[in-house]
Structures are given as C-alpha cells and as structure tokens.
Image (tube, rainbow, N blue to C red):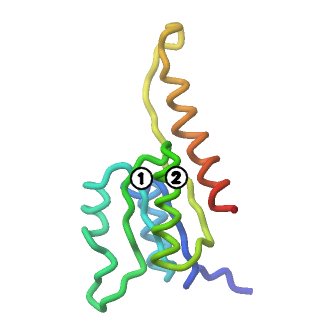
Amino acid sequence: MSFSIAGKTAIVTGAANGVGLAIARHFAEQGANVVCCDMDEAKLIEEFGRNPDNGDDGESNTRIFAGDLREKLTVNNLLSATIDAFDRVDILVNASRKVCTSDPLDPTDDTVQALLDQNLMTALRLSQHVAR
C-alpha cells in the first residue's frame, strides 16, 4: 500500500513560516502540487520566490497566494487560483495560527474574539469551501 502524495494538490495556510512552511516544503519535495498561502506576501516571496510557477524547467509544483482568509472573497480567490493552477484540491492543511497576549480580566479586550475568528472560524470556513 502506498501513501504517496505525488501529483496530489495541497493548499497549505500559514506557509510563510513555522509548521506551515515545513509542511509546504515537505509536500513539494514529495511531488505534490502546493499552493502556499499566508497573509505575509513578502515572506512567501522570500521563501518560495516571486513567481514559483516559472521554475528552471518552466514548470513548478508550487504557487504562492497572499491574502487574509478571514475575508470570504479571499477564500474564493484562493480556491480559484488553486483550480486554475492545478485543476483540483486534494489536501488542505490549516496551519495558519495567530498567537497574542491579552488581559483576561479586561471586559473590553477583544483579543479572544479575534483569535477565535483567525484560528477557528477561518479554518472552518476554508474547510467547508474546499469540501464542496
């Protein structure tokens, strides 16, 4: 039995650093088509190049996509860009996470809501869109 991901298409969020970057690189090395997504476009370009779709051989199995996935239009654009580049989505890795400190005793502090929106709801909405 083989568990190869060669030829599969993956979207990896949080791909500009940390776990997301490691997963995106590993998938690409294993032959998967990878759309590397993050809000930090400069870091994506630093890690993957400005136009990774124009590699030395004219083809590359990676693309970058910068945007705020809390926005519905951005999610739609990500899926469109992935389908345009690779015709399908087989794998979704929701590795994007935001970490920050807050004052749990301050009733006006909206940090927890912001973290829920970024870390939970974004992953849920993207998963729902990809599943469709």
The residue indicated by pointer 1 is: 18
Q: Which numbered tag is attached to residue 30?
A: none
Q: Point out the residue furthest to the front here.
A: 73
Q: What residue sits 47% from the left and 72% below the top?
A: 34
Q: Residues within 10 Å of mark 2 (few under 14, many from 20)?
A: many
Mark 1 / mark 2, whichever is N-terminal: 1
Figure label count: 2
Q: What residue sits 59% from the left and 71% below the top?
A: 89
**x%, y% of residue 65?**
39, 61
The residue indicated by pointer 2 is: 95
Q: Nearer the viewer, residue 85 or 49?
A: 85
Vertical side of 70 occupied by 93: above or below? below
**x%, y% of residue 51?**
27, 73
Label 2 sits on a secondary structure element that is loop
Quarter of the image that includes the N terminus:
bottom right
Label 1 sits on a secondary structure element that is helix
Q: Residues within 10 Å of mark 1 (few under 14, many from 20)?
A: few
**Label 1, label 2: how far apart the Cα atoms are:** 9 Å
Q: What residue sits 52% from the left and 57% below the top?
A: 76
Q: Amino acid at mark 1?
A: Gly
Q: Nearer the viewer, residue 7 or 76?
A: 76
Mark 1 touching mark 2, by CB under 8 A? yes
Residue 116: quarter of image:
top right
Q: Point out the residue furthest to the right here.
A: 1
In this picture, residue 58 sits left or right of residue 11: left
